[in-house]
């Protein structure tokens, strides 16, 4: 559906030659009907990439092909026609404040010269699809952030696009509203067989909705794969860093304080994070640690989730036992294709109650 080949983009001061490279020889393939995520830190080139797909930004080199048509070879009326088949929503909604929800959704149809009766037939079901049939006469100032984004989604769908580009579409929303918008996008993807390209800096968004994901770092594609593969076996340091951000935020404050209070010259126990993925989630590893090494993992936190239908579990615990046996136990865990990380240490006499 979307083919990106050798895309390069740089911005030069005052329109001159050279300048900062934002995209570097980037190539991607996105299948029809996929929800594909692009993730990276600020400045990674995510928004520039999505704007190159519909030529809001013109790349310096490379090709973009959407549904068999090379967008980068188009201009004028042909480019405008191609853009109507590529919907786009933004972080800040970009609604017209003087128009109602209905009129905002109708706006691109009016520009296309559609008559009022047909606009009514087209817009009404779109407002129903996004759950805003009762808000058709409301102005943006009367809508919540989530409702505004629903209007923006309906407007993007008005021209019956084959692709929907979402540039940080949930970044301005609270967590609960974010989940409702992601659920709506997933529903639209299924009902309309719509290909969705989602730009975000949040791994939690990727985890919730995407089929596959590509990770950008300073304009380079550093890895791509299924969401489960990226979560279970991240290859690049930038991916591991973003996953740590997601997982470490879940550590309880009292545990973080215990680790901070630990002094290296005192007796202590390591805090381990063991990640179970796929078939390894059924491994009875805890009982084996006691039996083989006389090491007990005092479980402080445990969570199991499902990513693309596969189990993904994390156990955080205090490894209690002789230091040499704890080291052997960690190697034993890793030998069973489980990920074991030492997050830090805690003192042996400062046990806190969770």
Image: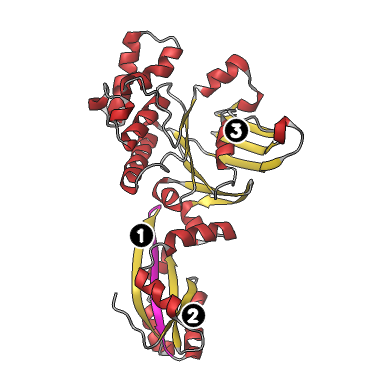
Q: What residue sits 45% from the left and 90% below the top?
A: 267
Q: Are marks 1 and 3 in contact (CB under 8 Å)?
A: no
Q: Are marks 1 and 2 in contact (CB under 8 Å)?
A: no
Residue under pointer 2: 330
Bounds of the magenta segment: 308-321
- Residue 305's label in the rendered image is 1
Q: Position of residue 293 (x, y in %)?
A: 44, 89
- Marks 1/3: CA–CA distance: 35 Å
- The tag earlier along the polypeptide, 1 or 2, is 1
- The tag earlier along the polypeptide, 1 or 3, is 3
Q: Residues within 10 Å of mark 2 (few under 14, many from 20)?
A: many
Q: Main secondary structure of the magenta part?
A: strand
Q: Position of residue 250 (x, y in %)?
A: 38, 63
Residue under pointer 3: 52
Q: Look at the image and tell me whether residue 336 can be seen.
A: no
Q: With 324 as the anchor, is 176 left or right in this view? A: left
Between disc 1 and disc 3, the foreground one is: 3
């Amino acid at each position: 559906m979307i083919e990106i080949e050798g895309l390069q983009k740089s911005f030069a001061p005052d329109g001159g030659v050279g300048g900062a490279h934002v995209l570097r020889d980037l190539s991607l393939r996105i299948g029809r009907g996929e929800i594909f995520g692009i993730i990276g830190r600020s400045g990674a080139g995510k928004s520039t990439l999505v704007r190159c797909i519909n030529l809001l930004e013109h790349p310096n080199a490379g090709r973009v092909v959407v549904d068999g048509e090379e967008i980068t070879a188009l201009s004028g009326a042909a480019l405008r026609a191609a853009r109507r088949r590529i919907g786009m929503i933004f972080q800040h909604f970009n609604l017209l404040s003087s128009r109602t929800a209905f009129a905002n959704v109708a706006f691109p149809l009016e520009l296309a010269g559609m008559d009022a009766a047909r606009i009514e037939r087209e817009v009404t079901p779109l407002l129903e699809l996004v759950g805003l049939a009762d808000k058709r006469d409301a102005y943006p100032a009367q809508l919540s952030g989530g409702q505004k984004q629903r209007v923006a989604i309906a407007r993007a769908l008005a021209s019956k696009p084959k692709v929907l580009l979402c540039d940080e579409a949930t970044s301005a929303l609270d967590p609960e509203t974010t989940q409702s918008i992601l659920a709506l996008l997933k529903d639209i993807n299924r009902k309309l067989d719509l290909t969705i390209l989602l730009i975000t800096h949040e791994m939690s968004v990727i985890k919730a909705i995407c089929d596959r994901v590509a990770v950008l770092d300073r304009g380079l594609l550093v890895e791509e794969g299924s969401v489960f593969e990226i979560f279970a076996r991240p290859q690049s340091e930038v991916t591991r860093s973003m996953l740590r951000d997601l997982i470490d935020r879940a550590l309880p404050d009292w545990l973080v304080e215990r680790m901070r209070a630990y002094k290296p010259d005192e007796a202590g126990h390591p805090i381990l994070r063991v990640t179970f993925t796929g078939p390894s989630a059924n491994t009875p590893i805890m009982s084996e640690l006691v039996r083989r090494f006389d090491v007990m993992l005092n479980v402080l936190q445990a969570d199991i989730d499902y990513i693309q239908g596969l189990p993904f579990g994390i156990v955080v615990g205090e490894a209690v036992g002789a230091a040499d046996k704890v080291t052997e136990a960690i190697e034993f865990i890793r030998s069973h294709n489980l990920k074991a990380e030492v997050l830090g240490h805690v003192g042996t006499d400062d046990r806190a109650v969770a």
